Image (tube, rainbow, N blue to C red):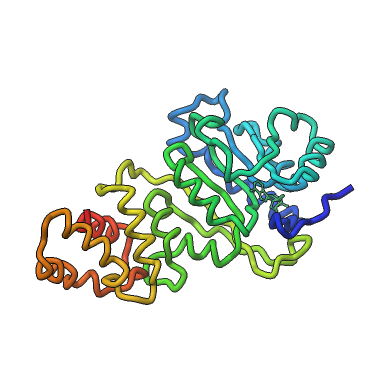
Amino acid sequence: MEVRAKKALGQHFLTDQKVARAIVDALACHSEPSCHSERSEESPLPVLEVGPGMGVLTQYLLERSDIDLRLIEIDSESVEYLLTHFPGMQGRLMEGDFLKLKLEKLFPERFAVIGNFPYNISSQIFFKILDNKDRIPEVVGMVQKEVAERIAEGPGSKTYGILSVLLQAWYDIEYLFTVGSGCFAPPPKVESAVIRLRRNARTSLGCDEALFKTVVKTAFGQRRKMMRNPLRPLARAKADRLGWSEDELAAFLAQEVFSLRPEKLSVEDFVALTRQLG
Ligand code: SAH
């Protein structure tokens, strides 16, 4: 018996074996020097597969001796399917919501993430990855094509946004390949794409990290406007803190950078802006 696809869980099962193999092959961590330095040949890197469904990626992941596979699946029917079809699933497979997982408890050390992500929660998955960025050296994920573009593209692009800046601050991102909707059952309405994220060498931003997130999110809250509008409250908070007059606040906000739209700013520009607002 196959799993009946449930729309609410974003279930579109990948049926193309070549694509499945290519996704698993894209997980490159075994050849990463940064991974090697922290684990010996005998201790495989823990890898978490999000939403294995009927196991199209799982089958190839289980073939790899360089990874220690764990799985999280929310759908009990899929869990049952995996337990019957894959020997050795017991103890690896958790039934539950990835977004609620206590990753710091399950994976106190480094681990990678892979999955054909449920598209309805793909942004939330990436925000959770960001919260654990220092223990996640690599992510390979299939997402809606637009989301892949948003994450991978740089300043100036129409799709550049909050996730692009926050992820690009910490990860090198590659758009690997596009996957047509015919590769799935049932076919999704949109095209899909596979991306790979590898943690860059950055250890600190050079500005307050929490404020950086706030600045990016606030600036993109009104992406079509000059940043002066959305960022005014943050500038005012600084003015209050430092006891500036209205004129001083106006002079501060008259700076060139506040006339730009957020989509023009690189990660470094946002870092500089955060320093100014801090
Ligand atoms: N990897 C499979 C299934 C992809 S569809 C394939 O490629 O065919 C997305 C999968 O994520 C489904 O199995 C769905 O049940 C699961 N899922 C949806 N929301 C989830 C969540 N919050 N946590 C864990 N798994 C989830």
Q: Is residue 78 above or below residue 14?
A: above
Would residue 126 be found to the left or right of residue 248 on screen?
right
Q: Is residue 26 above or below residue 237?
A: above
Instruction: Pinpoint residue 242: horizontal percent, then vertical percent.
Output: 13, 55
Depth order, front residue of 119/19: 119
Q: What residue do we see at 60% from left, 63% from top? A: 144
Q: What residue do we see at 45% from left, 47% from top? A: 130
Depth order, front residue of 242/147: 242
Q: Is residue 157 above or below residue 58?
A: below
Would residue 250 be found to the left or right of residue 138 on screen?
left
Instruction: Pinpoint residue 241: horizontal percent, then vertical percent.
Output: 17, 53
Q: What residue do we see at 77% from left, 47% from top? A: 54
Q: What residue do we see at 51% from left, 51% from top? A: 126
Quadrant of the rendered structure where residue 118 is? bottom right
Count the numbered circles shown: 0
Q: Is residue 111 above or below residue 216?
A: above
Instruction: Pinpoint residue 238: horizontal percent, then vertical percent.
Output: 19, 57
Would residue 33 be found to the left or right of residue 87 on screen?
left
Instruction: Pinpoint residue 257: horizontal percent, then vertical percent.
Output: 23, 69
Would residue 250 be found to the left or right of residue 35 on screen?
left
